[in-house]
Amino acid sequence: MSAISEIAGRGELASGAQVKVYRALKAILCARCGKEISETELFTRHMLEKSRMPLSPRCRKCVPFQLVPETGADSALLRSLLDAETRATNTHTRADAQAPSETEEKLLSRLGPALSRVRRNRSR
């Protein structure tokens, strides 16, 4: 089973409430209006009554939000880790990719085993 979305950051509703913002990895439908949320489009999720997880996707038309820019070391660290995973995947799939820098090599040597386990678990 492959993922249909990933967390893209935080958003702020008109009311000032903070929400998680997701990026669609596949085309999905808004649970409220039925509009297609296309691949790479940002959306939010709504908590269902009997669920402890936000499962119900909502498009920006139904739940308007502004993306909140991330600040601080935590978000920069997370962003660099996610970018490193993307670069590692692209390096393996593209024959003409440039050699990773020394910093990237160190990062991949430390995170490589954990990332490979995650990829194996996702492919099951």
Image: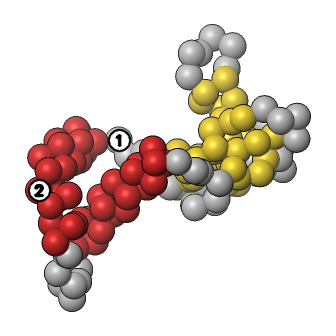
- Which residue bears the numbered disc 2? 109
- Residue at the image position 81 percent from the left and 40 percent from the top: 13
Snapshot quadrant of residue 105: bottom left
Q: Quadrant of the N terminus?
A: top left
- Mark 1 surroundings within 10 Å by alpha-carbon count, few (fewer than 14), some (14 through 19), many (20 or more): few
Q: How many numbered marks appear?
A: 2
| Quadrant in which residue 88 is drawn | bottom left
Residue 3, x across and y down, in percent: 42, 45
Front residue of 105 and 37: 105
Q: Amino acid at mark 1?
A: Met
Using residue 91 as the reference point, say whether residue 3 is left or right of it: right
In the drawing, what numbered circle is on residue 31?
none
The single residue placed furthest to the right in the displayed view is 15
Amino acid under disc 2: Ser
The residue under the point 20% across, 58% down is: 107
Residue 45 seen by the camera = yes
The quadrant in which the C terminus is found is top left
Vertical arrangement, residue 103 with respect to residue 22, above or below: below
In this orientation, which residue lies closer to the viewer: 11 or 5? 11
- Residue 55: name its quadrant: top right
Residue 115, percent from left and from top:
21, 48
Image: 55 above or below 118: above
Q: Secondary structure at mark 2?
A: helix
Residue under label 1, please give it: 1
Vertical order, 17 against 69 (above or below): above
